[in-house]
Image: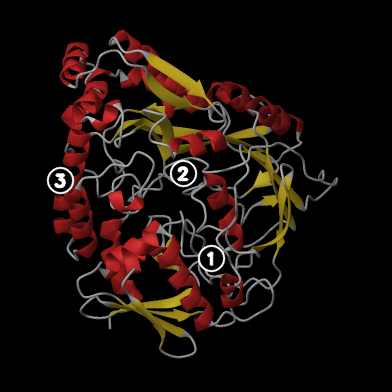
């Protein structure tokens, strides 16, 4: 058996080498969310025990396996924890697990639970809870299915769980990096909560995290409270790993869909922290003596999704035409309003990652109008309307859509831009007969098999389906050699830019703000408020 310290070194090959961080979202920012606005109780004078966080939308659920919404990721991981997580270098680190052992053949992974772990309802965390949670993860999460769909999970003793992987399936390195991925992550819950869940999700939000769920007032706030029975890891904080402490008694997440209201609220002191501030407010925040501006670089990459299943863009040449004709500097400048908040890059993985490859770069940001017009003609385009689904719930997505519409019209296309709130857009994009393009954004992934739109088995809206792509992704998952995996990823990225099921528009950084009496905030992957206090 090789102990975790050996595994930790191996996993360094599979993760980020810097602390760049993001969303995704899924692939989509807030699937099914119900935007709203509201307020939580005001903080008392003196030492503040209420931390009030304004978020741009409300999640549809806090059951992490039932949504890919960014807001669910931001809130849910204060309540839930997993066996492993990501440290400051994006390496896999133990969380609920005390140790991680991998067999010599790499096909068995054993986790020993830390002693004394308790759920928020006071119940001890047992191997039965972990097995039920992992089985639910592999059933409901695309990431879980790809990792342990054919694995056998058993308890070896009262504290040890073993995952026996399929001999022809994913490698242990792939499985561990997938388990540490926050989106639709392998959250550990009580077995009885899982057994009581229905198709809509779990009925109780009970985890082991530093905060416990108290109350959800729709369109007003989600209230979490310090969990006095929390057992922190006895290691220095690092990324999402190490010691976590709830340093405030009450934590309120307040959905405020209007960006101007969020900005006014952070300036007045109604909120202590505000996420997703429009970048054109950067100077206003930076110059306010009561505020700190927080820039996350990069936070997400913006994407244009094609309907690959029907209508015009079922034809690859039509997709290639759009990709050839777009001026992405103009698109990204419109989306951000500030060149400091974006960069043009073709990579499906970030330049900060060891996965990064140059393949496909020549197909990115071509700005070749004549080539685009020729490809449209070869695709048989006769001027029929191209329907773009847009939203103003995310202003940067709206601005990108407006500029792309203008650029397509200059190529001779007829374009209808239809604007919806995000939940309605999510609903409409499920019907391949009514749209051609929509805009969304994607988070940082821990390995290149995770972008949800690449694998046809995910049935992601856009419906890209290339058996060769599915085969390459499976080969990456199964390989235990990083050099082999990276060579395969070169083929993946090259195929992506040839097929163009979507267009990566550019990397986008994020802007948040907080009051100067808030101490200890550190951005990693997404916003988190353990180890944060208020003076």
Within 10 Å of disc 2 (Cα), the crowding (few <14, some 14-19, many 20+) is many
Please state the horizontal and vertical placement of residue 488, each as a whole percent of the image: 15, 52
501 with respect to 57 (left or right): left
Within 10 Å of disc 1 (Cα), the crowding (few <14, some 14-19, many 20+) is many
Which callout, 3 or 1, points at the residue further toward the start of the chain? 1
Please identify the quadrant where the N terminus is shown: bottom left
Please state the horizontal and vertical placement of residue 401, each as a whole percent of the image: 43, 22
Locate residue 302: give its quadrant.
Answer: top left
Callout 3–callout 1 Cβ contact below 8 Å: no
Label 3 vs label 1, nearer the camera: 3
Which callout, 2 or 1, points at the residue further toward the start of the chain? 2
Q: Is residue 338 visible?
A: no
User: Where is mark 2, residue-wise?
Assistant: 23
Towards the viewer: 346 or 87:
346
Please state the horizontal and vertical placement of residue 152, each as a whole percent of the image: 35, 79
385 with respect to 265 (left or right): left
Towards the viewer: 191 or 39:
191
Q: SS class of the residue under badge 3?
A: helix
- Alpha carbon separation for disc pair 3 and 1: 35 Å
Q: Which mark is residue 491?
A: 3
Callout 2–callout 1 Cβ contact below 8 Å: no
Q: Is residue 54 above or below residue 263?
A: below
Which callout, 3 or 2, points at the residue further toward the start of the chain? 2
Q: SS class of the residue under badge 1?
A: loop
Residue occupying the far bottom of the picture: 157
Towards the viewer: 263 or 469:
469
- Alpha carbon separation for disc pair 2 and 1: 18 Å
User: Where is mark 1, residue-wise?
Assistant: 81
Q: Residue at x 40, y 44 (%)?
A: 20
Locate residue 438: give its quadrant.
Answer: top left
Q: Is residue 331 above or below residue 17?
A: above
Label 3 vs label 2, nearer the camera: 3
């Amino acid at each position: 058996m090789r102990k975790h310290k050996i595994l930790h070194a191996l996993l360094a090959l599979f993760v980020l080498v810097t602390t760049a961080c993001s969303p995704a979202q899924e692939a989509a920012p807030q699937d099914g969310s119900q935007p709203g606005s509201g307020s939580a109780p005001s903080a008392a004078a003196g030492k503040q025990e209420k931390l009030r966080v304004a978020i741009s939308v409300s999640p549809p659920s806090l059951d992490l396996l039932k949504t890919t919404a960014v807001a669910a990721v931001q809130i849910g991981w204060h309540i839930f924890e997993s066996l492993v997580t990501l440290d400051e270098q994006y390496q896999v680190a133990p969380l609920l697990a005390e140790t991680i052992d991998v067999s010599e053949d790499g096909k068995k992974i054993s986790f020993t639970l830390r002693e004394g772990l308790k759920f928020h309802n006071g119940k001890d965390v047992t191997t039965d809870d972990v097995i039920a949670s992992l089985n639910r993860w592999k059933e409901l999460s695309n990431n879980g299915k790809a990792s342990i769909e054919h694995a056998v999970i058993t308890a070896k003793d009262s504290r040890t769980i073993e995952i026996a992987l399929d001999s022809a399936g994913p490698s242990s390195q792939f499985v561990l990096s997938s388990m540490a991925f926050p989106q639709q992550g392998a959250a550990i819950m009580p077995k009885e909560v899982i057994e009581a869940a229905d198709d809509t999700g779990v009925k109780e939000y009970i985890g082991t995290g530093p905060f416990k769920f108290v109350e959800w007032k729709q369109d007003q706030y989600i209230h979490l409270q310090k969990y006095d029975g929390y057992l922190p890891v006895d290691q220095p904080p690092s990324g999402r790993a190490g010691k976590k402490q709830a340093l405030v008694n009450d934590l309120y997440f307040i959905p405020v869909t209007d960006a101007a209201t969020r900005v006014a609220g952070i300036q007045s002191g109604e909120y202590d922290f505000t996420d997703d501030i429009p970048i054109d407010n950067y100077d206003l925040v930076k110059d306010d003596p009561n505020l700190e501006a927080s820039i996350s670089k990069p936070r997400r990459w913006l994407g244009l999704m094609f309907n690959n299943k029907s209508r015009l863009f079922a034809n690859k040449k039509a997709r290639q035409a759009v990709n050839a004709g777009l001026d992405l500097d103009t698109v990204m400048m419109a989306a951000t309003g500030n060149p400091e908040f974006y960069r043009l890059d073709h990579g499906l993985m970030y330049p900060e990652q060891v996965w990064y490859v140059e393949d496909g770069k020549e197909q990115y940001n071509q700005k070749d109008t004549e080539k685009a017009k020729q490809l449209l003609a070869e695709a048989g385009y006769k001027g029929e309307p191209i329907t773009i689904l847009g939203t103003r719930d995310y202003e940067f997505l709206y601005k990108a859509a407006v500029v792309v519409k203008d650029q397509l019209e200059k190529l001779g296309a007829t374009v209808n831009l239809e604007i919806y709130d995000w939940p309605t857009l999510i609903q409409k994009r499920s019907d391949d007969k009514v749209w051609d393009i929509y805009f969304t954004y994607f988070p940082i992934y821990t390995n290149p098999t995770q972008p949800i739109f690449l694998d046809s088995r995910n049935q992601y809206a856009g419906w890209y389906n290339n058996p060769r792509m599915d085969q390459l992704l499976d080969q990456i998952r199964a390989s235990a050699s990083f050099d082999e995996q990276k060579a395969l990823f070169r083929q993946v990225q090259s195929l992506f830019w040839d097929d163009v099921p979507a267009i990566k528009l550019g990397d986008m950084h994020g802007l948040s703000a907080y009051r100067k009496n808030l101490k200890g905030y550190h951005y990693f992957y997404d916003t988190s408020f353990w180890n944060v206090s208020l003076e």
